[in-house]
Amino acid sequence: MAFLPNPKSRALLFDVTRCVGCQECAKACKASHEFPGTGEETELDATTYTVVLDKGEDRYLRRMCMHCADPSCVSACPVGAFTKTELGPVVYDADKCMGCRYCMIACPFNVPRYEWSKTIPVVRKCDGCFERQKEGQPTACTEACPAEATVGGTREEMLAEAKKRIAENPGTYHPVIYGENEVGGTNVFVLSPVPFEQLGMRTNLGNDPMPNLTWAALSKIPKIVAGGAVGLSAIYWITHRRDQVAAAEHAEKE
Amino acid sequence: MRLPKLLRPFEPLLTPMRPNERFRPGFWTYLFGVIVAAGAVVTVLRFWKGLGAVTNLSDKFPWGLWVGFDVLCGVALAAGGFTITAAVYVFNLKRFKPIVRPTVLTAFLGYTLVAVGLMYDLGKPWNIWHPMVMWNPRSPMFEVGWCVMLYLTVLALEFSGIVFEKLGWKKASAVQHAATVPLVIAGAIISTLHQSSLGSFYLITPGKLHPLWYTPLLPWMFYFSAIAAGLAMMIVESRLSSRAFGRGLEMPLLQSLAKGVVVALGFYATVRLADMARLGVLGEVFAGTREARFFQLEMAIGVILPIVLLSLPAVRRNTERLFRASLLVVAGLVVNRLNVSLTGFEGAQGGHYVPSVGEGIITLMLVGIGMAVFGLAVRYLPIMEKVEEPELVASTEPSPARALTAVPLRS
């Protein structure tokens, strides 16, 4: 029961070759969510949904929620607090959340963050500017980017754009679009001049949605229940039948 | 002691099983008092200042001791509950009957404490009921939540027979007795599901969980290891309670259990190593990494050593040696669960997690409460030996003589 990427959903394309490391995206993200901080953080936290990381040699990498087509967090959450919207962003409903933090364990990109110091804590992660995108506006980070390093559009548009850039600039790009197939596809793509592991990105993810792995076990439940009920009842019948027979034979002898 | 009229039917519960036995507080009682006092302080801080104030949990290590030990080990070590009841009531292995009650009590307390531990660990514990109405069948956590709820109900019903017996409620006893076999079968199925599903949690973490522990067969590994350790736990617990309550040990029975542990461990070890060979990760065992050392520790004390020791009749026949060898199995299970939930993630997450003092205190407190309630239950309920009242008249006047009348076990 895998969920395929929706070509019409909203997606982002981040291009390492264009990023100048100005961190305007991170600052705009802070401003639009009214979060404290400078926008110059180097690690995601409960009030930092995206960071720009200096990878040396004038290369900068953005880190944010990848908005997977079939997200691990959505499948992991026991109460369905996460939703993959038709629009594209993966959103979270704090009212449903009971705070088990399995989403954080499950996420292959280590994105969800927790409010450890709060009495009533919730999970925090990039919401893909769901409210803005719903109104047809671009995400805050896209709007703020002066170098068009982050651009937005539909998933098929972004894929086409990425392919075009790779084709038109031979030798400029590592010829893979990160997110096209990883974990079954994401709504955030990354283009890089070097292989992605050189930027510290995970490249051992495979192209199957991670939720398939847990589903492979969970889908066996009906069989285990039915088999267990029938099997154990049969064993009960056999083992106790033996007693009955023994008792009857004993009675006959007397 | 006289209770208010409304509660008078419950008065028999207040009579100790051995009225002449005096409770004398000793070292462990005082230690328990200190731990509970410290636990109370941590509890206030936890719910007032949040998880960050008392735990070493972080965005890198969102699960720590409370999940790794209190939940994963708590559930696994209570696995005796479904194996022993199934052995007796389904497989008709009557010789295990004397330990059915302590096992059910252990499981009931174990799962209750898992639920209490979760109340500390969940960020918003007041929402713990949400999985009942907000369904997500694709989540292993959703399934475990439901199973634990259902199994706690099953255990409470299984346990109720003991209480009905003490109260002398003949009708309730009869109804409970009639329901025993269906309850046991339901309990075995539900346990199979959630013992394995605790392993399924980690199926979604390939590349994060170290290859020494990550396998598509994790649910099975959790299931088999829980059965072995659950049985070993029964030996450990029999030994502890025999010492604490001055009761005899059923050595022949414990020896049979020990043989069961060897078979279960042997099966687990075979499947585990064959699976590792299949996945081509056996080389990791000797890679000299931190993970490799923890894996070696887990396998040495929890699997290989106990298989060797418990295979020796000289170990099985000696109370003390049997106890220690079984304790190794329990310790090995604990190391395994902590390896899967913590050690195995340190490489990918970058850094180490060591539990805070507060996390340790709450865990100790929960274990202590479990032992204390076990002691109380043994004192006031017919747990350790089958005690029957000769005249089940509708009298609420408990008499010490009656409570003391022991009758032979029904076969």
Image (tube, grey):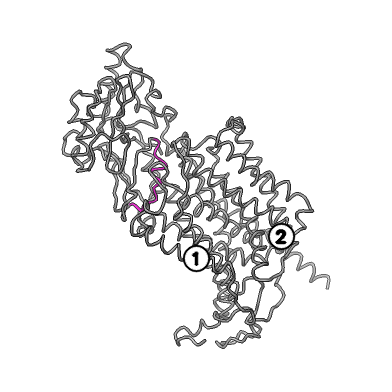
Q: Which residue is mark 1?
A: B34
Q: Which residue is mark 2?
A: B254
Chain at numbered mark 2: B
Along the line of sight, which residue is nearer the eye, B106 or A70?
A: B106
Task: Give the number of the disc on residue B225.
Answer: none
Residue B291: in magenta span: no
Q: Secondary structure at mark 1?
A: helix
Q: Position of residue B201 (x, y in %)?
A: 47, 45
Q: Which amino acid does the dot numbered 1 rest on?
A: Val
Q: Secondary structure at mark 2?
A: helix
Residue lying farthest to the right in this orientation:
A253
Q: Position of residue B39 (x, y in %)?
A: 45, 62
Along the line of sight, which residue is nearer the eye, B257 or B359?
A: B359
Residue A129 picture quarter:
top left
Chain at numbered mark 1: B
Q: Quadrant of the C terminus of chain A?
A: bottom right
Q: Position of residue B408 (x, y in %)?
A: 72, 75
In contact (CB < 8 Å): disc 2 and disc 1: no
Q: Residue at x 73, y 51 (%)?
A: B310
Residue extent of the magenta highlight: A97-108
Residue A99: in magenta span: yes
Q: Position of residue B388 (x, y in %)?
A: 65, 79
Along the line of sight, which residue is nearer the eye, B32 or B329?
A: B32
Q: Which amino acid does the dot numbered 2 rest on?
A: Leu
For marks 2 and 1, the one nearer the N-term is: 1
Q: Is residue B204 above or below residue A174?
A: below
Along the line of sight, which residue is nearer the eye, A107 or B93?
A: A107
Residue A14 picture quarter:
top left
Does residue B24 appear to the left or right of A87 in the view shown?
right
Same-subunit check for callouts 2 and 1: yes
Q: Is residue A19 above or below residue B109?
A: above
Q: Residue at x 32, y 45 (%)?
A: A82
